Image: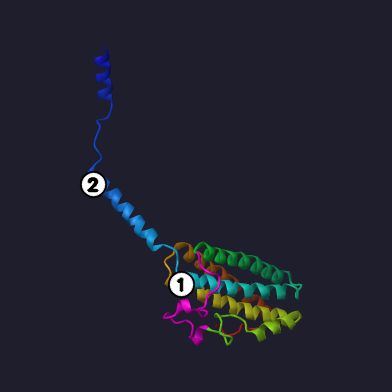
Amino acid sequence: MSTDLDAAVETASPPRRSFPLLGLIAVLLAAVVLVVFFTRQGTPSDSSPEAGFARDMGVHHAQAVEMSFALRDKTSDQALRGLAYDIITTQSTQRGIFMGWLQQWGLDQSASRPPMAWMSGHGHGGGAATAMTPGGTMPGMATPAEMDRLRAATGKDAEILFLQLMIRHHQGGVEMAEGLLRLSSREEVRAFAQHIVDSQNAEIRTMKEFLAARGAQPLPAP
C-alpha cells in the first residue's frame, strides 16, 4: 500500500526541475547592476554639487529665517505674519536636513571653497559676478546694508521692503535649486531641490500679489 501511496504523491507533485541557467545569469546581472548603481550613488565628495548645494542653501535659508523674524515683529497683517511664520518653520527644518546630509556624508558643514563654486563651469561659480550679490554671496541674498534697512523700517515700509527682498531671495534660491537639478543625479537631493523650486515659486506669486496690493513693484531679479 505504501508503494501505491508513494506513487500517488509522486504523480500529484510537480516535477522537480533544476534552476535554469538563464535565470541564474539574470540574477547575477541584476546584482551587478545594483552594485554599480549604489557605487555611483556613493557618498558625495567635499567638492561635489550636492555638498556645495547643501552648504550654500543652508546659509541662504538662514538669512530668509532672519528676515522673516524681523518682519513678523513689525506687522499686524495676519497674512504677512502667516507667510513669515511659514518661511521660518519650513526653511529652518530644511536647513536641518541639509546639515544632516553633510553629517551623514562625513563632510564639514562649512568649506574653504567660495560660495557657488559647485556651479563653476555651468554659468556660475566662485568668480561669476552674475551669480553673486555685491557682498560676494549666493544669488538673491540681501546685503548687510539692506538687512540694516529692514531692521530699521516700520509699518508699511517694512512690509514692502520685506516682500521685495524676500521675492528676490526666493528667486535666487530657485536659481540654486535649478542649478543642482542640472548637475546631480542623486535622487534624494534632486527631489528636495525640485520641492524648493515648486514651493518657492508658489510663494513668489503670493508675495507679488501682496506687494501689488501695497502699490509697490519687485526688485530686479538676481
First-in-chain label (2 vs 1): 2
Task: Evaluate whether residue 214 shows in this view.
Answer: no
Q: Is residue 97 left or right of residue 150?
A: left
Q: Amino acid at mark 2?
A: Leu
Q: Is the C-beta separation of discs 2 and 1 under 8 Å?
A: no
Q: Which is the main secondary structure of the residues drawn in magenta?
A: loop
**In the picture, which quadrant includes the C terminus?**
bottom right
Residue neighbourhood size for the residue with mark 2, other residues' Cα within 10 Å, grouped as few (<14), some (14–19), many (≥20): few
Residue in the foreground of this view, choosing between 218 and 162: 162
Give the x, y percent position of residue 188: 48, 62
Identity of the residue drawn at 46% across and 72% down = 49
- Rendered view: 11 above or below 70: above
Q: Is residue 117 magenta?
A: yes
Q: Amino acid at mark 1?
A: Pro
Identity of the residue drawn at 58% across and 65% down = 94
Identity of the residue drawn at 47% across and 66% down = 190
Task: Evaluate whether residue 166 shows in this view.
Answer: yes
Q: Mark 2 against mark 1, which lies toward the viewer?
A: 1
Instruction: Please name the residue that numbered disc 1 is placed on.
Output: 49
Give the x, y percent position of residue 130: 50, 86
Identity of the residue drawn at 71% across and 75% down = 70
Say which quarter of the image contains residue 140. bottom right
Give the x, y percent position of residue 6: 26, 19
Give the x, y percent position of residue 213: 68, 78
| Residue 9, disc | none
| Residue 22, disc | 2
Q: Is residue 49 magenta?
A: no
Q: Exactly how many numbered labels are in the figure?
A: 2
Q: Which residues are magenta?
A: 106-131
